[in-house]
Amino acid sequence: MNNYDGVLQHPFLVEHWYKGFVAAMAAWLPVFFLAAWMIPDYISLCIDFASLISAAILAAALTQYEGFELQPQAARYRTYTWVLGLRFKKWQQLPPVNYIAFRPYNRSYNLATAIVNNGDPVNLGLVANDSKWQVLLSIAGSPIGIVAACAAEKKASLIAAILGELLGVKVIAQ
């Protein structure tokens, strides 16, 4: 194996599901209302077309993920967004890696907020916690390094071992 290409993380769907719904509705509703107003005889054709567009947008929103790709021989890496088979992001030059670290990583998400009169968002107290393990490429002079994966402990350990072997550096659990 000469390179690594894997999932960095999937979006926390409870936090992002509404974006796909809003995007699908935003694509469907204007077409429907415009067609109903302008050409009443072709409503079913317009509804079919709008439904296909909204299904594609919803599928993209629900299946997209962040990935990490590493090519040690070319000394480059990228953290990309995968959407329906397309990868978005440019390659970066890989600085010298001292070691691979994997450590516990916890994130909290506010699931609901409200906007008060002055326009400031206020947390309504609904919080979800996401506990994962983070795989990091430790870079000299960088306090964090390059994040390569965020996964369950067993999978993160396996990814760290693969990356350590590819780069010829040791793996440290923190």
Image: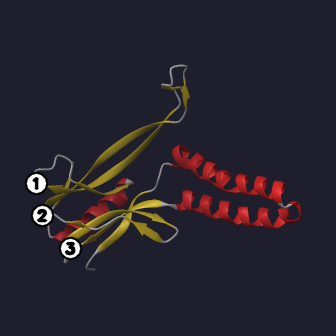
Residue annotated with mark 2: 96
Residue annotated with mark 3: 72
Residue 42: % across, % down: 85, 66
Mark 2 and mark 1 in contact (Cβ < 8 Å)? yes
Assess disc 2: are there few (<14), some (14-19) or many (≥20) residues with their C-alpha within 10 Å of its C-alpha. few
Identify the residue at horizontal 21%, vertical 72% (top origin).
Answer: 166
Residue 134: % across, % down: 31, 52
Residue 13 is marked as none
Residue annotated with mark 1: 140
Amino acid found under the numbered disc labelled 2: Pro
Question: In the rendered image of this protein, does residue 13 appear above or below residue 54?
Answer: above
Amino acid found under the numbered disc labelled 1: Ala
Q: Earlier in the sequence, mark 1 or mark 3?
A: 3
- Quadrant containing the N terminus is bottom left
Dot 2 falls on a residue whose secondary structure is: loop
Instruction: Write down the quadrant of residue 40 in the picture.
Output: bottom right
Amino acid found under the numbered disc labelled 3: Pro
Judge left or right: residue 80 versus residue 141: right
Q: Earlier in the sequence, mark 3 or mark 2?
A: 3
Front one among 120 and 21: 120
Residue 52: % across, % down: 70, 66
Front one among 151 and 67: 67
Structural distance between the alpha carbons of marks 1 and 2 = 8 Å
Question: In the rendered image of this protein, does residue 119 appear above or below residue 80?
Answer: above
Dot 3 falls on a residue whose secondary structure is: loop
Q: Earlier in the sequence, mark 1 or mark 2?
A: 2
Dot 1 falls on a residue whose secondary structure is: loop
